[in-house]
C-alpha cells in the first residue's frame, strides 16, 4: 500500500499532463524544461503509448531513453506519473499473437494500426501486460521522480472472440453453479434457448433478432470483472516493487463498460478524464457532473483529474474550441469538487500521428499563443492552491447510480428506445447544479442515511437488496424521489410481478404502476399543474400516496402522475413521466425546499457555482465560479487565495477561492 499521498510527494496540488517526449528531439526537450517551469508543471504522465519503444521485441526491453527523460524531469522539479503501456500493443505483438486481437460482435477480427487492439481475455495479452508492468516497476519502483503509477489507459474495450467465450463460460459456471440455475436466470425456456452443456454458451454476438437479456447483462458483468482482474494483476505486479499509489484513469461520465464502483475500490486514488460534449454553461455543468461522480466513486476521498483538453469540446462530429477563461473555470470546477489538481492530454500537441489535431498545453503555434499563456496562468493559480490538498467535499443530496441499472437499459426489446440512463442521470444532476446544490452519487445499496434527499432517476433494474435499502431509507426519515420506469426488473432481468416498482419500494412510495405507456417520439402529455411529460407515462395507482399532479389528457386523464407518500418518518415521491425542463426544475426546487437543503452559498444568484472544501483540521475554502456575463457582488468582501486580493465582486466569468475558516 502507498506510504505517502500524491500531494505529499508533490508538496501541493498536481498540474501537468501526458508527456510524450519520444515524439520530439533534444531542442524541443530543452524548451519543454523551460516551459514546464514557466507553467508550474509538477507532474507528467509518461509512457502511456510507449510499448513499442520500451519493448522493441518480445522480452527485450529498452529503458535507456525513458531513464534519460525521467531523470531530466526530476532534475527540473517535475514528478512522474508512470504508465504501463498496455492500451496499445505494438505490431510485433499482434503478429506473434493474432489470437489476441479483438473481435467485434459480428465476428470481425480487428487489426493493428490504431490503439486498443487487444482482447483483454487473451492469455498472451494478459501475460505480456503483466510482464511489462513488472519490468517497469522493477526498474522505476523506487525512483524518486515516480509519484504515481498509471495502469493502462481508460479500460473498457470489448471483445467477443473465442478466448472471451471460454472466460465467459468459466465466469458463468462460478456465478450460476449449474446449467439449471443459468437457464432459469436467463429465462431460456422461451424461444427454445435451453442450454444443455456449458460449451453451448457464447458471448452475445450478432443474432437474428433480440438477444437474451439475461445473457446480455451477464456478459456486461463478466467483462467488468475481467477488466478489474486485469487491472489487479498489473497493480499487484507494481506493488511488489513500489510503495507509490497506483491508479487507472477512468473515462467518465458516459463510458460504461465497467462497474465503476467496483473498479474504484481497487484504486489507491480515483483518477478520471473529462472532455465536455457541449460548450458554455453546459460544459461547466458537465465538469461538475464528472467531478461529483469521480469524488463519489472514491467514497468522498480526494481524487485527481487525469486528463482534460485545453481546447477540446467534443460536439458529435466536430471538436469545438474552449472560450478564453474556460480552462481556468473547468480546472477550478474540478478542484472545487475534490480533485487534487488538474492534468491535461497532452503537454505538447503532436505534429504527426492519429491525434495531431487534439489540443494540448503547448499548441502547434508554440508558447507564443493564447493557449499556452492561459495554461501558464492556470498553472500559477493551481500552485497557489496547495493549502487545499487533502481537504474534502460533502453533499446532502445524492443521485443514485448503478452499473446493472445502466446495462439493463441497453438490452434488446425494451418498450422504448428513449429510456436513456446516462441522460437521466445527467439531467437530475444538472437540475441540482442549476439550483446551486452540491451532489454526491451513491449506489442504491449504500447507507443513504446521511442524505436529506435522494433522487433515483433511472433504476429500471433494482435488486431486492436495493429495493429494501430504499424502503429503509424512507422509513428512517429520508426523502426519496423515484422516477418513471424504475424497479421494473430484478437483478436477473426478470419482470417484477403484481405491479411495478419492486414490492418494498411500492410500500415506501404508496403507489403501484399497473401499466406502462411509452409516448411516441416528440409526443407531449399535459399534466394538471401545467407541466408536460415526454418519453413515458404510466397508469399509476395511489395506494396511500397523495396525488400532487395528475395526467390531464388521454386515457390517463385524472390518474396520478406525481405522488408523495409519508412513510415511517420519511417521504417517498414518485414521478411517472419525464417532466419538461421547467417542470423538473420546479419539482427539484420543491424537494430542496421541503428537505431544507439550501444552496451552497446563499446570497449568490443562479449560475454562480459555489463549492466548499473542508480540511480535517477545520480550515475551509469556498470555490466560486461566475458563469454569468455580468459582475456579481459577493455577500461580503473576502480574500481570494488565487490572487491574494480582497474581492468585493466576481467579474463576469471570474473565479475565486475564498478562505472561509
Ligand atoms: C482519451 C485518452 C487520450 C486521448 C484523449 C483524446 O481520454 O486517454 O489518450 O486520446 O482521449 O480526447
Image (cartoon, grey):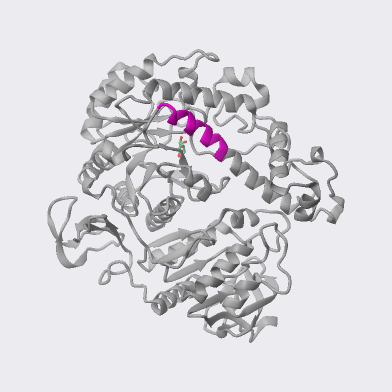
Q: In this view, does 303 lie above or below 515?
A: above
Above or below 156: residue 301: below
Q: Residue at x 64, y 65 (%)?
A: 521
Picture quarter containing residue 66? top left
Nearer the observer, 236 or 444: 236
Task: Give the image location of residue 81, x and y in percent.
Answer: 37, 32
Compared across the picture, whether 37 is left or right of 134 comes to left
Residue located 73% across and 43% down the image: 173
- The magenta span reads 228-241
Q: Residue 650 in the image: state x and y as whole percent.
A: 21, 60
Is 231 one of the magenta-colored residues?
Answer: yes
Query: Which corner quadrant holds the N terminus?
Result: top left
Q: Image check: 6 left or right of 647?
A: right
Q: Is the magenta stretch mostly helix, strand or loop?
A: helix
| Residue for point 55% across, 28% down | 114
User: Which of the 4 image quarters holds residue 523?
Assistant: bottom right
Q: Does the magenta stretch include residue 314?
A: no
Instruction: Residue 411: give x, y in percent of width and height.
Output: 69, 54
Locate residue 401 relative to residue 203 in the image: left or right: left
Residue 93, x across and y down, in percent: 59, 20
Amino acid at each position: 500500500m502507498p506510504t505517502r499521498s500524491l500531494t505529499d510527494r508533490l508538496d501541493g496540488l498536481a498540474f501537468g499532463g501526458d508527456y510524450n517526449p519520444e515524439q520530439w528531439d533534444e531542442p524541443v526537450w530543452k524548451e519543454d524544461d523551460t516551459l514546464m517551469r514557466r507553467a508550474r508543471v509538477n507532474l507528467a504522465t509518461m509512457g502511456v503509448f510507449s510499448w513499442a519503444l520500451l519493448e522493441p521485441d518480445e522480452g527485450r526491453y529498452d529503458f535507456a531513453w525513458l531513464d534519460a527523460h525521467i531523470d531530466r524531469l526530476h532534475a527540473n522539479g517535475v514528478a512522474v506519473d508512470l504508465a504501463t503501456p498496455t492500451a496499445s500493443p505494438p505490431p510485433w505483438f499482434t503478429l506473434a499473437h493474432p489470437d489476441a486481437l479483438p473481435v467485434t460482435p459480428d465476428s470481425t477480427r480487428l487489426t493493428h494500426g490504431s490503439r486498443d487492439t487487444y482482447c483483454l481475455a487473451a492469455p498472451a495479452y494478459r501475460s505480456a501486460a503483466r510482464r511489462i508492468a513488472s519490468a517497469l516497476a522493477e526498474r522505476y519502483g523506487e525512483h524518486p521522480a515516480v509519484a504515481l503509477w498509471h495502469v493502462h489507459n481508460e479500460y473498457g474495450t470489448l471483445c467477443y472472440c473465442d478466448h472471451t467465450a471460454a472466460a465467459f463460460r468459466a465466469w458463468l459456471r462460478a456465478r450460476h453453479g449449474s446449467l439449471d440455475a443459468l437457464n432459469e436466470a436467463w429465462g431460456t425456456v422461451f424461444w427454445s434457448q435451453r442450454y444443455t452443456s456449458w460449451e453451448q454458451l457464447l458471448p452475445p454476438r450478432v443474432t437474428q433478432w433480440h438477444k437474451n437479456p439475461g445473457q446480455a447483462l451477464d456478459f456486461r458483468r463478466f467483462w467488468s470483472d475481467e477488466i478489474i482482474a486485469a487491472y489487479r494483476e498489473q497493480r499487484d505486479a507494481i506493488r511488489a516493487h513500489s510503495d507509490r499509489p497506483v491508479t487507472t484513469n477512468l473515462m467518465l461520465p458516459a463510458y460504461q463498460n465497467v462497474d465503476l464502483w467496483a473498479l474504484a475500490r481497487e484504486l489507491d486514488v480515483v483518477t478520471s478524464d473529462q472532455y465536455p460534449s457541449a460548450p458554455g454553461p453546459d460544459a461547466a455543468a458537465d465538469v461538475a457532473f464528472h467531478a461529483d461522480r469521480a469524488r463519489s466513486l472514491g467514497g468522498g476521498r480526494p481524487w485527481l483529474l487525469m486528463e482534460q483538453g485545453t481546447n477540446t469540446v467534443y460536439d458529435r462530429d466536430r471538436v469545438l474550441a474552449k472560450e478564453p477563461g474556460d480552462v481556468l473555470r473547468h480546472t477550478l470546477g474540478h478542484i472545487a469538487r475534490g480533485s487534487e489538481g488538474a492534468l491535461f492530454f497532452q503537454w505538447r500537441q503532436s505534429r504527426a500521428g492519429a491525434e495531431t489535431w487534439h489540443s494540448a498545453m503547448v499548441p502547434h503555434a508554440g508558447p507564443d499563443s493564447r493557449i499556452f499563456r492561459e495554461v501558464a496562468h492556470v498553472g500559477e493559480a493551481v500552485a497557489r492552491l496547495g493549502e487545499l490538498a487533502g481537504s474534502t467535499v460533502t453533499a446532502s443530496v445524492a443521485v443514485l447510480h448503478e452499473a446493472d441499472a445502466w446495462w439493463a437499459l441497453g438490452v434488446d426489446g425494451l418498450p422504448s428506445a428513449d429510456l436513456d440512463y446516462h441522460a437521466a442521470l445527467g439531467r437530475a444532476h444538472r437540475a441540482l447544479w442549476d439550483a446551486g446544490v452540491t451532489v454526491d452519487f451513491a449506489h442504491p445499496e449504500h447507507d443513504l442515511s446521511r442524505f436529506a434527499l435522494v433522487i433515483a432517476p433511472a433504476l429500471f433494474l433494482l435488486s431486492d437488496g436495493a429495493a429494501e435499502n430504499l424502503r429503509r431509507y424512507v422509513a428512517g426519515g429520508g426523502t426519496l424521489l423515484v422516477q418513471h420506469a424504475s424497479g421494473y426488473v430484478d437483478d436477473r432481468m426478470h419482470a417484477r410481478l403484481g405491479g411495478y416498482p419492486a414490492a418494498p419500494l411500492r410500500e415506501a412510495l404508496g403507489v403501484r404502476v399497473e401499466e406502462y405507456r411509452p409516448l411516441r417520439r416528440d409526443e407531449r402529455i399535459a399534466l394538471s399543474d401545467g407541466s408536460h411529460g415526454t418519453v413515458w407515462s404510466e397508469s399509476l395507482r395511489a395506494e396511500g400516496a397523495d396525488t400532487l399532479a395528475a395526467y390531464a389528457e388521454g386515457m390517463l386523464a385524472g390518474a396520478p402522475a406525481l405522488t408523495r407518500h409519508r412513510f415511517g418518518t420519511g417521504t417517498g415521491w414518485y414521478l411517472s413521466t419525464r417532466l419538461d425542463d421547467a417542470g423538473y426544475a420546479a419539482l427539484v426546487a420543491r424537494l430542496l425546499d421541503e428537505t431544507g437543503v439550501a444552496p451552497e452559498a446563499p446570497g449568490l444568484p443562479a449560475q454562480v457555482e459555489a463549492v466548499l472544501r473542508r480540511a480535517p483540521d477545520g480550515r475551509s475554502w469556498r470555490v466560486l465560479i461566475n458563469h454569468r456575463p455580468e459582475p456579481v457582488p459577493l455577500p461580503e468582501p473576502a480574500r481570494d487565495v488565487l490572487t491574494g486580493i480582497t474581492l468585493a465582486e466576481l467579474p463576469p466569468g471570474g473565479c475565486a477561492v475564498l478562505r472561509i475558516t
